Amino acid sequence: MLTCVIARPSRFGAKVKSFDASAVLAVKSVVEAFPVPTGVAVLAKGYWQARKGAEAVKVEWDESDTEARSSGEIISHYKEKVKAVGLAVSEEPALERLPAAA
């Protein structure tokens, strides 16, 4: 039975631009490495061999569609959004919408 471990990008949304499987295939018991939509899949005869193979893969990522803002910038953006007035769902208090106790 083969085990698969996927080498994933460090940034959400990145895609495999190219990868070099030579170092991966040099890891004992690694059978194959190929690109998948979420990274590079490494197949091996056991978990640790697949894990070592995934760590050895050299990938060039296409980050053109990834989020470019830092965590701090995203948090600042959401803090500004919280200050904006939104749409009211209901004018009546939440307690008045609860069903009466039986």
Image (cartoon, rainbow, N blue to C red):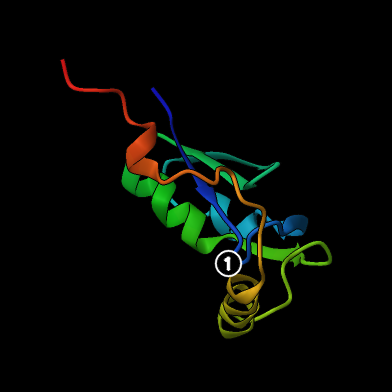
Instruction: Check the picture and name the quadrant holding the C terminus.
Output: top left
Residue closest to the far right:
64
Instruction: Check the picture and name the quadrant holding the N terminus.
Output: top left
Q: Is residue 33 above or below residue 100?
A: below
Regarding residue 15, the answer to whether it shows in the image is yes
- Residue at the spot x=30%, y=23% of the render? 99
Q: Residue 44 placed where, x, y %?
A: 45, 38
- Residue on which disc 1 sits: 10
Q: Is residue 47 left or right of residue 41?
A: left
Q: Residue 47 placed where, x, y %?
A: 34, 41
Residue 73, image quadrant? bottom right
Crowdedness near tag 1: few (<14), some (14–19) or many (≥20) residues, C-alpha within 10 Å: few
- Residue at the spot x=63%, y=66% of the render? 11
- Residue at the spot x=41%, y=46% of the render? 93
Q: Residue 31 placed where, x, y %?
A: 53, 37
Residue toward you, 101 or 29: 101
Q: Looking at the image, how many numbered discs can be counted on the residues?
A: 1
Q: Is residue 19 left or right of residue 12?
A: right
Q: Amino acid at mark 1?
A: Ser
Regarding residue 46, the answer to whether it shows in the image is no
